[in-house]
Amino acid sequence: MLNDLINIRPMEEQDYEEVRSLWMTIKGFGIRTIDDSRESIVRFIRRNRGISCVAETQEGEIIGAVLCGHDGRTGCFYHVCVDENYRLQGIGKQMVIFCREALEREGISKITLIAFKENPTGNVFWKKLGWEERMDVNRYDFTLNDENRTNFIR
């Protein structure tokens, strides 16, 4: 327990609705119409069991979440968030440590993530934790389904 007030635990399939509600409050977040559907997130959690996490209050309210997975070689963080009312208490950092340690147990030695440029809070968070912004690579996407759009939370 974080300060005996917040519990960091593995994300479960039944957490989806509450986690999605939290995502919808995070300014700068990009939510994909298909990839962030219940079906897609449940598939992701099943494929990466025990690696994603949530932060919850003593009352069981989810106030933070990290989607985390790997491809056998590189880990990836998606949708790292903490409710605005609970920020600057170390909750995000503790969730990142939870996921990092889970990846290490899986034999993964590198983690990557995307922070949208329109998300200054997220970018400050990652830099503060010592993550390096890469300037030596270009990132490319190829969309297989044009219905899978990213909608930004404003």
Image (tube, rainbow, N blue to C red):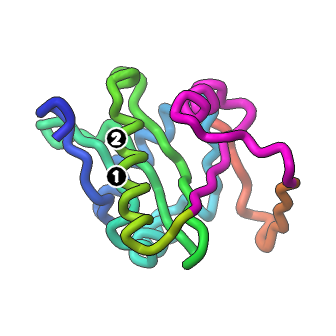
Q: Which of 129 and 140 lies nearest the eye of the viewer?
A: 129
Q: Quadrant of residue 116?
A: top right
Q: Residue 77, how many percent across, how many down?
A: 54, 54
Tell me the quarter of the image containing the N terminus: top left
Q: Is residue 9 magenta?
A: no
- Pick the front one: 81 or 93: 93
Q: Read off the residue under disc 1.
A: 98
Numbered circles on residues, count: 2
Q: Which residue is mark 2?
A: 94
Which residue is more in the foreground, 144 or 120?
A: 120
Q: Is residue 119 magenta?
A: yes
Mark 1: few, some, or many residues within 10 Å (few <14, many ≥20)? Answer: many
Name the image quarter holding residue 22. top left
**Residue at the image point whose x is 29% and y is 62% from the top:** 14
Q: Looking at the rendered structure, which numbered label has been put on residue 123?
A: none
Q: Is residue 89 left or right of residue 146?
A: left
Whether pointer 2 and pointer 1 mark residues with C-beta atoms closer than 8 Å, the reply is: yes
Amino acid at dot 1: Phe
* Location of residue 109 with respect to 84 vertically, above or below: below
Residue drawn at 85 percent across, 54 percent down? 137
Q: Is residue 96 visible?
A: yes
Instruction: Report how far apart the C-alphas of labels 2 and 1 lie in the structure.
Output: 6 Å
Image position, residue 9 (x, y; %): 25, 53
Disc 2 element: helix
The part of the chain drawn in magenta is 110-137
